[in-house]
Image (cartoon, helix red, strand yellow):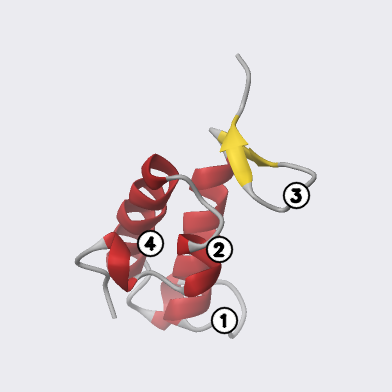
């Protein structure tokens, strides 16, 4: 299901990502969910949800990195 608000995101996302990263995650997830709705558009037998979560994490990783504490922080430029 698409996420309408960041408060609906999985706990692992809400508990560790800064607010802006959560927004990136939500937008990327929803976009991927639309883009990969048809099974033939996905690789292997991954579900629509699995692919959407992978895309969302990849989007977050372009701007954020995981710190030693397990929380995510904005990458240095």
Q: Where is residue 21 in the image (x, y as percent from the top left)?
A: 44, 44
| Viewer-proximal residue among 48 and 45 | 48
Real-space Cα distance between discs 1 and 4? Answer: 15 Å
Real-space Cα distance between discs 4 and 3? Answer: 25 Å
Of pointers 3 and 2, the one earlier in the residue sequence: 2
Q: Are marks 2 and 1 in contact (CB under 8 Å)?
A: yes
Instruction: Between label 2 and label 1, give the one nearer the viewer.
Output: 2
Q: Give the label on residue 46, or none.
A: 1
Instruction: Between label 3 and label 2, give the one nearer the viewer.
Output: 3
Residue at the spot x=49%, y=45% of the render? 59
Circle 3 sits in a helix, a strand or a loop, which is it? loop
Residue at the spot x=59%, y=37% of the render? 73
Instruction: Between label 1 and label 4, give the one nearer the viewer.
Output: 4
Circle 1 sits in a helix, a strand or a loop, which is it? loop
Of pointers 1 and 4, the one earlier in the residue sequence: 4
In the figure, residue 3 lies in which quadrant?
bottom left
Of pointers 1 and 3, the one earlier in the residue sequence: 1
Residue at the spot x=50%, y=57% of the render? 55
Q: Give the label on residue 69, or none.
A: 3
Real-space Cα distance between discs 1 and 3? Answer: 30 Å
Of pointers 2 and 1, the one earlier in the residue sequence: 1
Real-space Cα distance between discs 2 and 1? Answer: 10 Å
Q: Name the residue under label 2.
A: 54
**Other-residue count near label 4 (Cα within 10 Å), few / some / many at <14 / 14–19 / ≥20:** many
Q: Do the residues labelled 1 and 4 touch (CB within 8 Å)?
A: no
* Relative horizontal placement of residue 49, taking residue 38 as reference (left or right): right
The residue sitting at the top extreme is 77
């Amino acid at each position: 299901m698409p996420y309408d608000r960041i408060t609906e995101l999985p706990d692992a996302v809400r508990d560790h990502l800064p607010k802006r990263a959560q927004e990136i995650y939500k937008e990327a997830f929803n976009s991927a969910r639309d883009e990969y709705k048809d099974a033939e558009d996905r690789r292997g037998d991954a579900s629509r949800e699995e692919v959407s979560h992978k895309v969302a994490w990849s989007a977050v990783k372009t701007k954020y990195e995981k710190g030693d504490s397990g929380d995510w922080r904005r990458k240095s430029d």
